[in-house]
Image (cartoon, rainbow, N blue to C red):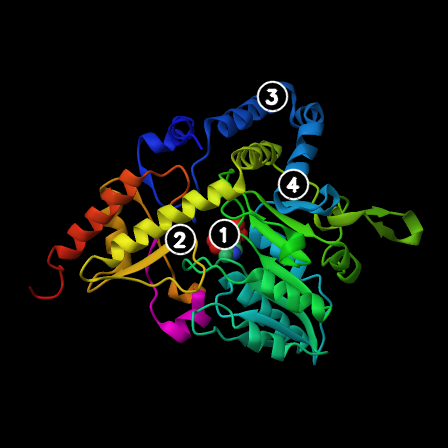
Amino acid sequence: MDVKQLRQQTPGCEHRTHLNNAGAALMSTTTLEVMRAQLRLEAEIGGYEAEAAVFDRIEGTRRSLAQLVGGDQDEIALFDNSTHAWNAAFYSLPLRRGDRVLTGVNEYGSSALAYWQVSRRTGAELVVVPNDSTGQVDVAVLADLVDERTKLIGLTWIPTSGGLVNPAGEVGKIARAHDVLYLLDATQAVGQLPTNVGELGCDLLTGTGRKFLRGPRGTGFLWAGERAIERLDPHVVEIAAATWDGATGFGWHRGAQRFETWENSYVNVLGLGSAVDQALAIGLSAIAERAISLGRRLREGLDQIPGVTTHDLGADRCAIVTAALTGRDASEVKDQLTARGINVSTTVPEHNQFDTEVRGVHPLVRFSPHYYNTDDEISRTVDIVAAIAAASPRNDGS
Ligand SMILES: Cc1ncc(COP(=O)(O)O)c(C=O)c1O
C-alpha cells in the first residue's frame, strides 16, 4: 500500500489527524470528483436525465457492494444509512408471541430499541446473550439458547463502543445448524475487515458508506441472501419494491430490490461506488492489517500512560480504541484533542445500555485510525494524551 500517495489523494489528511473513522472517514479526491461531476450533470441536464446517463455506473455500485461482501448484485439493496437498511430487514420478519430474538450485549442502540418496540407490539421475547470472559458474545451460551422458538439471531460484528470483533462466523455456524435467520450488523466492519457472507454464514448484512468504507454520508446498504428473501415480508411496499398488477394486487420485485425506496441520491450512490472500488483495489486484507496494527500501536501506547486505561473487549480486536483518563470527562479530552488537530469521538452510555449495565465505563474517548493514518500521527496522539493526563485535572481541587 502506497500510504503517501493515498494520503495525497485524501484532502482531509493535510489538515487534521483524523482518528474518527468509526464516525465518518475521509473521502478521497476520486470520490469527491465523481460526486461533483454527477451533481454538476444534474444541474446541467436535469436530475432524471443525469440518472439515465449514468445508469450502468449506478448498477456498478450494486456490483461493487456485492463483490465487497461476496454476494450477488441482486442481493444488494441501497439505502441512505445502515439503520434504515437494518430496519428494512428486521421489521420485515414475521414475529409473534412465544417467538424469540437472540442478540448480544454490544448490540447497536437503534437495533436494541427496535427489538424492544417489536417485542412490545408482538409479545416476542428478546434474549440478550452474555459475553464470555474475553468480552465477546458467548458462543457456547448462544448455542445452548437457540431452540425452536428462536426466529432471529441479531448481532453486531464490531460495536460502535469499542475495539471488540465479535466471532460473527462462529455465530453463523450456529444459525446455519439450527436453520435460524441471522442478521449481522457490519456497519463498523465493512471497509475495515474482509467481509464474506458465505464465510460469515449470515442471511442479512447491513453496512454504511461513510465509516471505514470512506464513502459519502447518507449512504448504506443491505445484503439479503436467498433464505432471507424467502422468509421476510418487506414491512413497506412501494413502486421501487413491487409491481402493481392492477385489480389483482402486486408482485414483489426480484431479490433485495424489494426493500428499496424509489428516490435516491445518485450523487451519493456514485460516491459510494467509487469508495467501494477504491477499497477493493487496495485490498481488504491489506486495509485490515494496517488499520488494526495502527489501532494496536495506539492501544499499547495509551496503556503505558499513567492515569489512562483502555477498555476494548474481546479476543480479537479491530482498529477502534477506547480509553478513559482518570478524573477527566471524555468530552473534555475530546475537545482538547480537537484543539490540537486530532479528531476523535466519545461513546454514549445511553446508546450502549446492555454494555453500560455490565461495565459502566462509558463515556469513553474513542480513537479510530484507518490505513491512511501514519505511525507519526499515532505517536503524536499518544504524546498529547500523556500531556493531557499529566496536567492537573481542573476540578479536583489541585
Ligand atoms: C455498530 C453500528 N451499527 C449501526 C450504526 C448505524 O449506522 P448509520 O448511522 O449509518 O445508520 C452504527 C453507527 O455508528 C454503528 O456503529
Residue 96 sits inside the magenta stretch: no
Is ligand 1 closer than 8 angstroms to the Cβ of mark 4? no
Is ligand 1 closer than 8 angstroms to the Cβ of mark 1? yes
Q: Which residue is mark 4?
A: 67
For residue 384, say whether it is visible. Answer: yes
Q: Which residue is mark 2?
A: 320
Q: Nearer the viewer, mark 3 or mark 2?
A: 2
Q: Nearer the viewer, mark 1 or mark 4?
A: 4
Disc assigned to residue 188: 1
The residues bearing labels 4 and 3 have C-alpha atoms spaced at a distance of: 28 Å
Q: Nearer the viewer, mark 3 or mark 1?
A: 1
What secondary structure is marked by label 3? helix
Above-or-below relation of 327 to 44: below
- Image side of residue 149 versus residue 158, left or right: right
Residue 358 sits inside the magenta stretch: yes
Q: Are the residues at dot 3 and dot 1 in contact (C-beta closer than 8 Å)?
A: no
Query: Which is nearer the eye, 19 or 141?
Result: 141
Amino acid under disc 2: Ile
Q: Are the residues at dot 3 and dot 2 in contact (C-beta closer than 8 Å)?
A: no
What secondary structure is marked by label 1? loop
Kindly identify the residue that appears in the image at 28 percent across and 58 percent down: 330
Q: Earlier in the sequence, mark 3 or mark 1?
A: 3
Disc assigned to residue 113: none
The residues bearing labels 1 and 4 have C-alpha atoms spaced at a distance of: 18 Å
Q: Which residue is mark 3?
A: 41
- Image side of residue 59 versus residue 286, left or right: right
Q: Earlier in the sequence, mark 1 or mark 2?
A: 1
Q: Earlier in the sequence, mark 1 or mark 4?
A: 4
- In magenta, the rendered stretch is 352-367
Circle 3 Cα neighbour tier, 10 Å, few/some/many (<14 / 14–19 / ≥20): some
Circle 4 Cα neighbour tier, 10 Å, few/some/many (<14 / 14–19 / ≥20): some
Query: Which is nearer the eye, 232 or 113?
Result: 232
